[in-house]
Image (spheres, grey):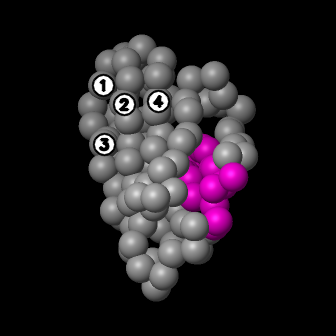
């Protein structure tokens, strides 16, 4: 079993920045991918960014150039630095571990 604890969401004006954090505990395999999905009201959950322990990353086209995923393998923690935020980035952001385990979600709201 793996437990994920997220933090860092909040309310920010368009153009602002936020940094999300997610720490995994339990039966951790360090090479497993970790990352972020998001779900806006009335929309399906979508992939935002995923990173591997080896440094490979994958981003949704809508966030490329604005968001950066990073991880600290020693701390089993993944981060999402979100810059130049837009109102359409408003969603609940969920951390995943190996696409199998999910955090409780953290709300990100971007006002125009």
Label 4 vs 3, first from the N-terminus: 3
Foreground of the two, 72 or 64: 72
Label 1 vs 4, first from the N-terminus: 1
Mark 2 neighbour density, 10 Å: few (under 14) some (14–19) many (20 or more): some
Q: Single out the residue that lies furthest toward the left.
A: 11
Provide the residue designation for mark 4.
Answer: 82
Provide the residue designation for mark 3.
Answer: 8
Q: Is residue 40 visible?
A: no
Evaluate if marks 2 and 1 touch, with contact meaning CB atoms under 8 Å apart: yes
Provide the residue designation for mark 2.
Answer: 18
State the CA–CA distance, disc 3 to disc 1.
Answer: 11 Å
Q: Residue 56 in magenta? A: no
Mark 3 neighbour density, 10 Å: few (under 14) some (14–19) many (20 or more): some
The quarter of the rendered structure image containing the C terminus is top left
State the CA–CA distance, disc 2 to disc 1.
Answer: 8 Å
Q: How many marks?
A: 4
Which secondary structure lies at badge 1? strand
Give me the residue at 51% from left, 75% from top: 28
Which secondary structure lies at badge 4? strand
Provide the residue designation for mark 1.
Answer: 12
Q: Position of residue 24 (x, y in %)?
A: 42, 66
Foreground of the two, 80 or 88: 80
Q: Position of residue 105 (x, y in %)?
A: 38, 57
In the rendered structure, find residue 2 and report the number of the disc placed on it. none
Quadrant hosting residue 16: top left
Evaluate if marks 3 and 2 touch, with contact meaning CB atoms under 8 Å apart: yes
Mark 4 neighbour density, 10 Å: few (under 14) some (14–19) many (20 or more): many
Q: Residue 46 in magenta? A: yes
Q: Note whether 90 is above or below 105 in the view shown.
A: above
Q: Which residues are magenta?
A: 31-54
State the CA–CA distance, disc 3 to disc 2.
Answer: 7 Å
Instruction: Choose mark 1 or mark 4, whichever is in front.
Output: 4
């Amino acid at each position: 079993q793996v437990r994920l604890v997220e933090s860092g969401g909040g309310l920010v004006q368009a153009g602002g920045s936020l940094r999300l954090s997610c720490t995994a505990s339990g039966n951790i395999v360090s090479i497993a991918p970790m990352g972020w999905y998001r779900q806006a009201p009335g929309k399906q959950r979508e992939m935002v960014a995923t990173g591997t322990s080896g440094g490979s990353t994958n981003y949704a086209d809508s966030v490329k150039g604005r968001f950066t995923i990073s991880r600290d393998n020693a701390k089993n923690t993944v981060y999402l630095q979100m810059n130049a935020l837009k109102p359409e980035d408003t969603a609940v952001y969920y951390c995943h571990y190996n696409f199998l385990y999910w955090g409780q979600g953290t709300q990100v709201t971007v006002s125009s």
